[in-house]
Amino acid sequence: MNATMFSALAPILMLSLTAVVLMIQASIKRDQSVAWVITAVGFLLTLWSASYARDFIQPVTILLEVDHWSLFFTSLILMASLVTLVLSKETFSSEGERKEEYYLLLVLSVLGAVVLIQSSHMVSLLLGMELMGVALYAMIAFPERGQLPLEGAVKYLVLSACASAMLLYGFALIYAATGELSYAGIGARAALAYAENPMLMMAGSAMVLAGIGFKLSVAPFHMWTPDVYEGAPTPVTGFLATVSKSAVFVALSRFYIDGALYQFSGLNTALVVLAIASMLVGNWLALRQKNIKRLLAYSSIAHFGYLLVVLIALTYLEADLVSQSITFYLTAYIVTTLAAFTIVSMVAGEDTAKQNISAFAGLFWSRPLEASALTVAMLSLAGIPLTAGFMAKFFVITVGIQSGLWGLLAVLVIASAIAIYYYLRIIFAMTQSAQSSGNSANWQEKLAAIVLMASILALGSWPQPFIAYAGLL
Amino acid sequence: MSETIWLIPLIPLLSSVTLMLVGTRLKASQVGALGVGSVGISALLTLLLATEFMQNQQVIQLSLWTWMEVAGFAPGISFYFDGLTLVMMSVITGVGFLIHLFSTEFMEKDPSYARYFAYLNMFVAAMLVLVMADNLLLLYLGWEGVGVCSYLLVGFWYQHNANGYAARKAFIVTRIGDTAMAMGLLLLFTELGTLDIQTMVGEADQTWQVGATVPTIACLLLVCGAVGKSAQLPLHTWLPDAMAGPTPVSALIHAATMVTAGVYLIARTHELFLLAPIAMTVVAVIGITTSLMAAFTALMQTDIKRILAYSTISQIGYMFLALGVGAWSAGIFHLMTHAFFKALLFLGSGAIIHCLHHEHNIFKMGGLRTRMPVTFWSFMIGSSALAALPMTSGFFSKDQILLQAYQFPEIGPGLWVAGLLGALLTAIYSFRLVFVVFFGSVNTEPDKDTGWRMAVPLSILCLLAMVGGWFMIPVSEVFPASDGSHPAHWVEYVSISVPIVGVLVAYLIFYTGQLKVDRLANSSFGKSLGKLWLSGWGIDLLYDRLFVKPYYGLANKLKSEPVDALYGLIVTINQTLNQWLSSAQSGRMRWYIASMVAGLILVIMLAANLPEGAL
Amino acid sequence: MDGLNIPLNHILLVSSLLFAIGMLGLMIRRNIIFILMSLEVMLNAAALAFVAAGAHWGQPDGQVVFMLILTVAAAEVAVGLGLVLQVQKRFKTLDMDDANRMQG
Amino acid sequence: MVMINLILILLIGGLLAMLSERISDTMPRKVAMVVVLTDLVYLLLCLSGMPEITQLQAPVANDPSTWLMHFKTDWIPAFGISIELALDGISLLMVLLTLILGAIAISASWTDIVVRKGFFEANLLWSLAGVLGVFMALDLMLFFLFWEVMLIPMYFMIAIWGHENRGYAAMKFFIFTQASGLLMLMSILALVAVNQSATGIWTFSYFDLLNTQMTEQAAHWIMLGFFIAFVVKLPGFPFHTWLPDAHTQAPTAGSVILAGILLKTGAYGLIRFAVPLFPEAALDFSSAAMWLGAAGVVYGAVLAFGQTDFKRLIAYSSVSHMGFVLLGIYAWNELALQGAVMQMVAHGFSTAALFMIAGSLQERLHTRDMREMSGLWQQMPRMGAVAMFFVVASLGLPGLGNFVAEFLVLLGLFQVNIWITVVAATGLITGAAYSLLLMQRSFQGQANQKWVDSGLVDFGTREMLTMAVMIVALIFLGIYPQPVLDAAQPVLQSLLNLTTSPTVAIVEVM
């Protein structure tokens, strides 16, 4: 444990520091705006520290692997958290007395996500996931009034605890099989362990898959998604959909790659089944959904189905093209989903009536900025060219073709075709003329919307720089 | 002169365009002047051309520009002028001019006077292109062009749906033939590599020997086209309905010129037909059958124009007979004379209809001999020419046809007898018309007599119908000379006497009434036969049942887009799946956990390859 | 270390049984309290498995993870119970089938 | 660069049109018109500097330097995707058609659009820009991009300014085209992957992919992807059902662009990509494709005959006419191909005009149901006459563009497969049937008292002017089509050389 390691850990330390400062501030004087500013500053500093840590990339003890990839995602989710922060301000200013804790929870959750991303060891993965999760339960249940947030929180808590149990049990089995807790170690002994006791190894990794699959809301572990998405306050939903999911996916892919699990055909078939199920089920569920938050929940199910295709391709391709694709896809997904939730929270806020798609009628004429941003987001989710979503799909299909996964690709095409329908429904609703109240949003939210829309278009129409950059990771 | 023949079709065309563009702003007199004048000029030019041609029997070929040039397919906008063309052109412009003149009075009350002349001029232009074309594609242009003009003019009084229907029927029925003809063009080009008539027939002679399959098929396809345009069996049904148009139109299009285009086509491509004897026999048979069928039908009609329409069909049948038996020049000759006397008859009937405030039923007329002398005489002359009484124009042409038919190998005499029967019937129905309309008691008082603009054309046509038979049509160069052999004299005598008998019969039945046919007519057999003839052998009804109704039915069936139902199915599938899955989202936590557990078990089984193990 | 030496598989069997019991509890129990308890059972099943595995490989890691799991479980339950109070307050029931406003 | 400018002018012009609404209500349409005309003039000026197309030496299909224009610059080098535009005779024809019809469409929207004029004109110009891109893009990725993106403004046009059932129509249109687009994307990527595995380099350039070596089976599947995508847009027989709804529901200008231009992109794609990229596969497939075409001709005609909705009838007539294009393309000899190209141009004008007439009727009568119209000629003789002209044009009257097209197609087809020719030829008869029925039901017959009382206004100067353009164009195409044929000839020739003259082979096949 030398000095450079601390520099490598800079983001984690910075976040922890922020958390501490927040607690102190809360104990001195309760003031939301101050807490908000502290958190914002903390995030910005962490962002900076992430770039600073680039020069010191190294495995930090056995637990954490600080490399370009993890640092990139660290900064990515920090940006996402910043957006969440911006949205939270409006949302919770209406709440009662206690608000500062929310920011604390946010910071802790982000901390958990960062640990999760950098984890290279079952324990760190467990720690990160739980830190992130526990904080999230509280964030979901944060509103003092209303039943939906609470219900969502309880459901999420129970179900994800159950999932964690599965995960842990899986780890235990793998540990029993290999005697290793670190990914690298597992990767080294996996083949041998399988030879010795296949059932143990497979059952273990299968349970891990199930546990993580739940967090990614992959069918058939998807059922919690709509309820939690709807129940949670919109900014939190955004956070859950982007930060937590992508962090978990990064962890999964690390585990899958370093743990050399892709060598097991059985696991692969399992992944294939999950992928197909999620693509179809997600889109079918979304088809006629009225509530936009639930709809986005379903669409996210489908999107992680698409993403799984890349993971499956690991068996046939060298890791770097795969990780590149994952990077691009997750980035595109985060940006797009955030844009969507930003608009939802700007337009609908926490009012379930306003979250109904029909309530979006006439948005094009009453609030052109929001409408166009949401349109761009929807087109990106649908994978129309010139948007980030298209390039993401481009990557997936390319990878799929390169590894000859024709069946999966066929399903992907069908699924995307179905998906177009419900994304268009939203756009169509917005174009229809109706007198809708133009309640205004504050400038930060507007800024966020514009930035996100711009980056979606940028990623879609001029991806070369980013691809080049992602290639280096 | 020979360099400027392109003016002849152009002038009517220009006047037509002018009338379309500014017609509504012109005074009636100006419209008339333009309409008649343009055709008049063309007629004059044709006359000049004719005189020139008479001196130097020289064929003119004039190419304006290449229409299109694709992979060796290079039809030109180019004209070919020879004796045959001259005959046709003179008929079109000459008779056309007279009819235009007649129209100025006939139509003067009509609100859309300009539109009428615009269409009529365009028709003349298109018809001229048809006969002047030196390649089959340009001919096809004129061919379709006259078709459209006929459609427009038949449906000229578009306010009445009946007229619209008649017009559509006319166009579509002929279109069927035209499409077959187009196929013929495709075949000819694919086989011979050109559509230029002169080179084509040259090619044909080298490529095929007589009786080969390809030329036979090609000729039969062309015949289909001709049958459609010339209202022969089985595509004749449109012509009687086409009488819905203004009478001068019927005179010009449906008697004198357009309906004879089929005859022209076959005559023009006769070298091809000479290679396909079967096709020629078919033509002859079609011709004679049609002419008999039509003659019987004409016997029973009461509408003056329908009588004339059926007689036209029947006369064109004679022309087809002529072509079929290789009596080319006789056919063309009859075409010309027929143009004269049939135009005369139509214009006459037009005059009657005009003066009897649009009365069509002959039995509501009568005794017009004294009231409308000009018309009476034109009808007398016209009918005698139609019945081919000696010394009239019709006599010469029809006589030639019958004699040459007699000489036709094998079935010749049969054709001849049938032809005679036709001639007899012709005489009867044409004079039935005369006696019923002009003799006997006056049933409807004409409110006026014909003005000069009607009288002049009538009298000129009378003249032509009388002396037309002495014209020498300059087609000797075009057609192979027929061997000068004549059949036995008794054949000629019979041929001459038959029409006279016919007139007598008509006289006895319809004038003096000495010859009673009531018993026969009232017998159940007679009644049904009469009905059958009146309805034109029920062919219209047959087609209606066979083609029209089924097509409507089909269209209505398919209207709901069966193909779309397929996609509808996909939609329903997705909807049902959506419903099932949504109902699974019950919000019950235990249920969610159950699904997770199920998933877990599934994943474990898959991971451990248990399915294979189990199997 | 001598003394009684139980083969790994037996313990894993026990732990899997525990796990199954917990999962069953989750599936049949409607009362939130019992649900949380079932969760505890599941987590402890995992913990047991870890300890056993650690013993099997003669490593301390197993016990370490066990401690970790304890804390995790504690945290989960802490938040969980907090939520339980709210549930009681807002839904006037602890039956999770009744506390169910969102579906479809 | 010229080609980039052509597109940019439209894109920026669209923005201007949208903003100009702030100045005045009538500003957008003027701006839009100016923009399109500028684009047209600019193109013509650039062309005037070039060698006469007729004297242009036959461009070698896989050598861009022999083309009229060629522009290439990197876009996503990581995958060898570049911004590559090129122009040859056919693309030039299509571009000109697009711009002319664009101007016509704007004129059609002059009074038709009453709300959100600015946004409408913007969408119109943007879709034009997309179409231009489709016609000029020679990098498959770029092509696909334009292909998909041009639909979005079109979708908005239908969804916002469409008629009573616009939601359904817009959705159907978008899903059909997008789903087929995904297939094409798969095919493109598969083709590129095959090429990459063979040569080791990533490239999406048409010129590099032209002679990709692949197994017969692979070729068949990939070709099928392209084929379906293009045939859906064309639209070919079983995939046509989006068209009647879209055309019927779209605002007049939208229908004009849809029928006049967008359908042609499908045909263009077939000529440019589907056949040349996979000559053998296309050859094996040609009989099937031609039967589809013939089926389309007949089916479209019969359904058109059954319609009571003015616009729907025209829409089905498009299905029928586009069948000829499909036939012409897959007969794949010079006659037929020239016919197909002619049909693309001629049908562009005739159908656009008919849709404009339909639009003006709807504007005046507020209905498209022909059972409610009758004898409109009496009150609107000008419109009646114009309608008559375009009706006879669309039933293929010789001397007008459509006849040349259909006859050439049949001529070429006859040399390949006689029976398909016979079936297709019946389209001439059925075509006459529905065209004349249209005329009868709307303009002829007893005048409907309702309209007599309401006092309809006949075509005005602007409308007559617009119509005059198309009338002149059709007559010109009909009696002197040579310029068009000359423009297309070298290109088609080179394509034919490229594809080892399937015609001969097809004859052997049948």
Image (cartoon, coloured by chain):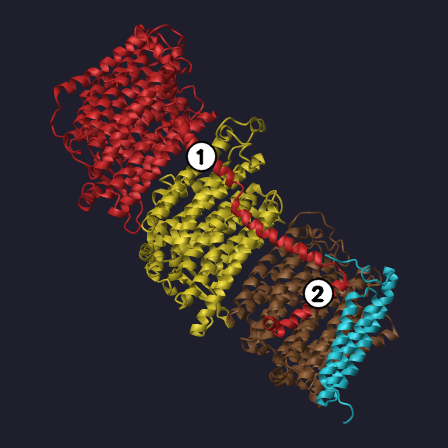
Chain colours: A brown, B red, C cyan, D yellow
Q: Quadrant of residue A445?
A: bottom right
* Apparent side of residue D87 relative to residue A79 in the rendered image (left or right): left
Give B184 or D376, whichever is nearer the viewer. B184
Crowding around mark 1 (Cα neighbors within 10 Å: few <14, some 14 to 19, many 20+) is: many
Give D46 or B328, whichever is nearer the viewer. B328
Residue occupying the point 28% across, 27% down: B289
Q: Is residue B110 visible?
A: yes
Crowding around mark 2 (Cα neighbors within 10 Å: few <14, some 14 to 19, many 20+) is: some
Across the whole image, how many numbered discs are drawn on residues?
2
Q: Which residue is mark 1?
A: D436
SS of the residue under disc 1: helix
Q: Quadrant of residue A116?
A: bottom right
Q: Which residue is mark 2?
A: B595
Give A279 or D432, whichever is nearer the viewer. A279
Hey, what amino acid is under mark 1? Answer: Leu
Q: Quadrant of the C terminus of chain C?
A: bottom right
SS of the residue under disc 2: helix
Where does residue D146 sit, x and y in percent of width and height? 51, 59
Depicted A234 relative to depicted D370: above or below = below
Where does residue D245 sit, x and y in percent of width and height? 55, 45
* Apparent side of residue B601 relative to residue B94 in the rendered image (left or right): right
Q: Quadrant of the N terminus of chain C?
A: bottom right
Hey, what amino acid is under mark 2? Answer: Ser
* Apparent side of residue C3 relative to residue D217 in the rendered image (left or right): right
Depicted B520 relative to depicted A180: above or below = above
